[in-house]
Amino acid sequence: MNYQQILSEIHEEIKPYMHLGKVADYIPALERVNPDQFGICITTTEGESFMLGDATTAFSIQSITKVFSLALCLNIVGNDLWNRVGKEPSGTAFNSLIQLEVEKGIPRNPFINAGALVLADLLLTHLPSAEADYLAYIRSVSNNHTLDYNREVALSERETGYLNAAIANLLKHHGNLENDIERVLHFYFLQCSIEMSCRDLSEAFLPFANHKYAFSPGDVNLTTSQVKRINAIMQTCGFYDEAGEFSYRVGLPGKSGVGGGIAAVYPGRYSVAVWSPRLNAKGNSIMGMRALESLTTRTEESIF
Ligand code: DON
């Protein structure tokens, strides 16, 4: 498969959509990003990588971080995690409060904000130095030891993060947060603020594509079965109320972030990360979704 040629063809195909949509402006520091950027990187299980455009430019990974948090939590507490978080698609926006109230503080899945706040709480309880340990894990899995939190983005999100604060309060009310609300929010915003390029992300997602082998970057060891389950949750919940649309158009497990990034895997073959900051109404990258749709259509490689 000539992925480099395919990436060029995809880029030509989707150029007309470059100026559609707008950057996430509810996090003030993200509003300043140049919206007209596009990068993509594929890393194969055989160790090759193929890049195009702004593939080495770092951006705010935002909700993509939730996949790393899930991997860490499963590694630490195993199936006990599912006593505190569900694994069903929500069909609602990533920051919705509705189900959380009705379902008495048990988030539908680990990828909506409510679920990710529970993951952050769990990591604060179990990791000796949560901030340093989390970063060390991401540096290790992406093979890039220069990666870091962007504290300005994290603080900026806290200043306008009323909805996340409401979610955290509701979780606390129902006894599903052990740590102090401010600590949990701060750690969650820091996780979201990590900056990575498409190249870093596709490297970091490769273990999810290589699920036949033990997943052991750094000190994290997940079984083949656990990796299968993380991919299943990406497939059903990775795009919130657009999970069906992503599944229909792309047909790969993946996870989006409001920084405009999407990481996805074709198990057994490759991981791919794409980035373009302009988002659709559901908070997912317009060019990113189009690029991945074109990739799986052209290569006829998808899980379906
Ligand atoms: O909590 C938030 O709203 C952001 N830090 C992350 C949201 C996000 O990336 C949703 N994904 N598409």
Image (spheres, rainbow, N blue to C red):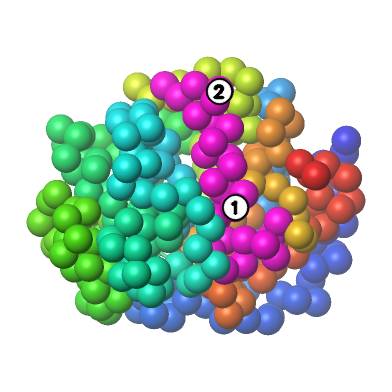
Q: Quadrant of residue 46?
A: top right
The picture places residue 279, in percent across and down from the top left corner, at 58, 74
Q: Is residue 12 left or right of residue 104?
A: right
Query: What stretch of residues is rendered in magenta?
Result: 221-247
Could you tell me which quadrant the N terminus lies in?
A: top right
The label shown at residue 224 is: 2
Res 141 seen here: yes
Could you classify mark 1 by the number of other residues whose Cα lies within 10 Å: few (under 14), some (14-19), or many (20 or more)? many
Helix, strand or loop for disc 1 = helix
Magenta segment: does it hold 147? no
Q: Which residue is mark 1?
A: 236
Do callouts 2 and 1 mark residues in contact (Cβ within 8 Å)? no
Name the residue nearer the viewer: 122 or 130.
Answer: 122
**Which residue is drawn at the image coordinates 42% and 21% (left, top)?**
221
CA gap between label 2 and label 1 equals 19 Å
Q: Quadrant of residue 276?
A: bottom right
Number of marks in the rendered image: 2
Residue type pointed to by label 2? Thr
Q: Quadrant of residue 217?
A: top left
The picture places residue 27, in percent across and down from the top left corner, at 36, 75
Q: Is residue 51 left or right of residue 224?
A: right
**Which residue is drawn at the image coordinates 75% and 64% (left, top)?**
290
Name the residue nearer the viewer: 184 or 166.
Answer: 166
Helix, strand or loop for disc 2 = helix
Q: Residue furthest top?
A: 214
Identify whether 17 is placed above or below 76. below
Identify whether 186 is placed above or below 69. below
Res 150 seen here: no
Magenta highlight: main SS: helix
**Which residue is drawn at the image coordinates 22% and 68% (left, top)?**
170
Could you tell me which quadrant the C terminus lies in?
A: top right
Identify whether 116 is placed above or below 100. above
